[in-house]
Amino acid sequence: MTFYVENETKAKFDFDIEELARSVAEAVLKSENCSYNVEISLTITDDDGIHEINKEFRNIDKPTDVLSFPTISYDEPGDFSVIEGEQKVDLLDPDTGNISFGDIVINENRVRSQALEYGHSEKREFAFLVAHSMLHLCGYDHMEEDEAAVMESKQNEVLNSLGITRD
């Protein structure tokens, strides 16, 4: 897996942003049985930055905690067989041979405020947002109650497997 991190806000936490994001992303890909070498881009921004992106790409005129931009169009969540064939050619980075998997944008301000709100560490909140976003990159959504339950269960499994709990 190739992981690119752009820290627009020069955010500093008491954990290594890239190391934590990479370990969570790898755990999600492993749990989803994704055997492809993938490239993922992570941008850390602030309220203004994510507000602008949210407005431009989703037509929602407010900041949010995390945005996910998958490059793969799935028939079913977690079914990576769609990568084969013509879609693989479109997704393949010719320089690395990796599959372009998608982009994640995390709002530094929300990591901090939501950690306080939910009573857990900033590390746990950051890891949660990465896991959540990675599941979106794997084709999962939470628009319906049953979809939300699946995502919540998968997020908790990954974070628990890494020992990242709400404590």
Image (cartoon, grey):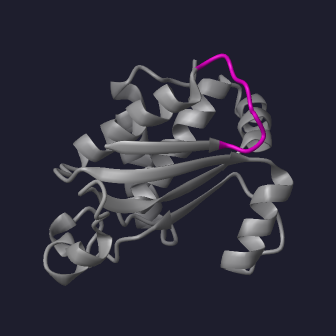
Tally of marks = 0
Part of the protein shown in magenta: 7-15
> Where is residue 105 drawn, in percent x and y?
62, 53
Is residue 22 a member of the stretch shown in magenta? Answer: no
Q: Is the magenta region chiefly helix, strand or loop?
A: loop
Residue 62 is drawn in which quadrant?
Answer: bottom right
Q: Which of 92 and 65 is in front in this view?
A: 92
User: Residue 10: within the magenta?
Assistant: yes
Residue, x 62% and y 49% (percent of image)? Answer: 43
Quadrant (top left, top right, bottom left, bottom right) of the C terminus: top right
Position above or below: 19 against 27: above
* Residue drawn 39% across the image and 41% down it: 25
Q: Left or right: where does residue 3 sit relative to residue 91? A: right
Tell which residue pokes out farthest to the front in this image.
Answer: 95
Q: Which of 5 and 152 is in front in this view?
A: 5
Quarter of the image with the N terminus is top left
Please indicate whether residue 42 sits to the left or right of residue 108 in the image: left
Q: In which quarter of the image is residue 149?
A: bottom left
Q: Which residue is drawn at 22% across and 76% down?
A: 89
Residue found at x 24% / y 50%: 37
**Relative to residue 70, is residue 7 drawn left or right?**
right
User: In the picture shown, does residue 79 fall above or below 35?
Assistant: below
Q: Pick the residue in front: 87 or 148.
A: 87
- Where in the figure is residue 118, as x and y percent of width and height? 70, 33
Q: Is residue 25 above or below residue 60?
A: above
Residue 16 image offset from top left, x and y in percent: 57, 22
Using the image, determine if residue 29 lies above or below residue 104: above
